[in-house]
Image (cartoon, helix red, strand yellow):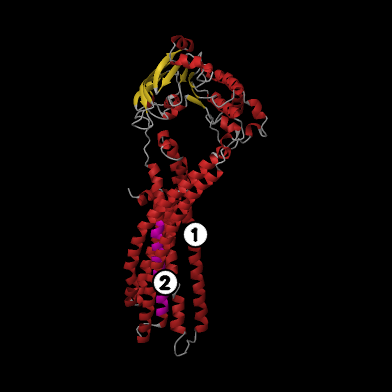
Amino acid sequence: MSIYRRVLRYYRPFWGQTGFGLGLTLGGIGLNLLKPWPFKIIVDDFLRANGAARSDWRLWIPLLCVALVVIQLFWGIINWITNYLFVKIGLQALLKLRTDLYSYLQSLSLKYHDMRRSSDSSFRVAYDSQSIQTIYNKGFTNIFGSAITLAGTFLIMVRLDWQLTLLSLAIVPPVVGAIYFFAHRIRRESTFIQERESAILAQVQEGLSSIRMVHAFGREEFEVGQFHQQASQSLQANLRLTLTNVNSALVISTLMVVGTAAMYYVGTLHVLAGTLTLGSLLVFSAYLLMLYQPLESLTYTAWAMEGATAGAKRCFEVLDGQDDVVDSSGAIAIAETKGALRFQNVSFGYAQDRHVLHHVDLAISPNQIVALVGGTGTGKSTLLSLVPRFYDPAEGSIAIDGRDLRTVTKKSLRAQIAIVLQDTLLFSTTVRENIAYGRPDATEDEIVDAARRAQADDFIRQLPAGYASPIGERGGHLSVGQRQRIGIARAFLKNAPILLLDEPTSALDPATEAAIMETIKELMRGRTTLIATHRLATIHNCDQIVVLERGSVVEQGRGPELVARGGVYANLYISGKFHT
């Protein structure tokens, strides 16, 4: 399906409004075509060459002047209404496209997002999406108005002087050729500009989000240099597009001036020969402008459409992206679960030719606390991410209460899972809304109770507005320990039967870690828990410890048992290689 047909689909809900607007446009075009006639009548009937004037000129000349004002007034009102209406329709379609883009990006798997910069996706939602409005307001509606104006002007010009009309149209073939020549270059250069602008946004987001690291290592000048390099490439791309636009405008305007000059010359000969009145020549000149103006408008419309098409194409590339984590046909929604998990021959890799997990077999009983232990890159976090189906295994299967996860809807599955990460992700809103993020319908008492259980209530009440205090971007107004407690309170409030903990204390100092671990122990009680950690002392007495090496399970059992075996875990525990 072509880009333009896909764009038109977003305007289907507004066909009625569009039809009304196009009807008004026809009325406005008709009034516009009437504008030259009052002056033609004045010239031919009242400004005669012999100086003789009609006796009723005192009546008709004022009326003709008033008629010109009335025509202009009604044309202006119609033009105002249609402009507002078409802009409103364009903005409504833009809203729908942006919502579809953002919604689809939210539904796509993490693998899709891993392969792309978040800033590029943001740029497509915020800026590329505006192309749908450009194609409509500067494209479809402009083409309709210009085409009708061209047809009406042509018919009137033929009746006035067909020879002059044909002469005036002689420039159309070279104009069309110029449009075709420049259009492809404009689309190509516009696409490159969109990519450069997206790269600038990525550079800015990365540099500002890492501002502490930049300052810490004194890399301000380097970051500015990197930004200047990206901005310079965007500048060069914009200059190339500007040069193309200027060259094309010069070619088109020159062709139109040639056509106008030829018409003036031949038209003057016709007036001198008596085959055309002076008033008719003046009217013809006015209509020639009306003919060339929409023709020129169509030229720039074609180039604007090419530039907008580049943005629309980038939007539809997102909507065409395939979600590789989908619910199977007939997937059911589960309302509750006991929390039994079974990994059977599970292998997974972020790239097809490079697996992170290899043939993992693991059985977890309801309410059991299982610790995942291993060095960096052994697959602990990856194994956790397979449980809520952030990814699907490349081989094998994962079951919940004996049911394959792929036969359960993602939404209902994730409702049964609470997650606490090493770096708690918070939103730039209030403390209350962050705690209730997983349960937005929670009452105030439930939110406060969750905060108390996470030992967060005391410091929250000391904030300027308590639970209504904004926490800044990514929780920047809070300490690491405070952010972690907010994340734990969020998990308490969700009260899910399965709990995933990914290095929940590794970024904390020993004192804070000890306090947080007491809270986490309360959180784990009565839940099936998987905890990935380097802190062996905190999980030594878990129900089960799973030791991973290079993505494979090499040991399983309780801490004391594994130490007694004298294997990998024992070496790590005794040597203190991991934090204890």
Tell me which corner region of the image, top left, top right, bottom left or bottom right, holds residue 164: bottom left
Q: Relative to 106, does residue 237 appear above or below in the rendering? A: below
Residue under the image location 42 percent in, 20 percent down? 548
Q: Considering the image in quadrants, where does the C terminus appear?
A: top right
The residue at which mark 2 appears reads as 289
Q: Secondary structure at mark 2?
A: helix
The residue at which mark 1 appears reads as 81
Taking the magenta stretch, the answer to whether it contains residue 307 is no
Residue under the image location 35 percent in, 70 percent down? 154
Q: Relative to 69, does residue 383 appear above or below in the rendering? A: above
Can you give x and y, in whole percent of width and height, for residue 448 in the image? Answer: 62, 26
The answer to whether 433 appears left or right of 465 in the picture is left
Mark 1 or 2: the one toward you: 2
Taking the magenta stretch, the answer to whether it contains residue 296 is yes
Q: Relative to 221, does residue 443 appear above or below in the rendering? A: above
Q: Secondary structure at mark 1?
A: helix
Tell me which corner region of the image, top left, top right, bottom left or bottom right, holds residue 469: top right
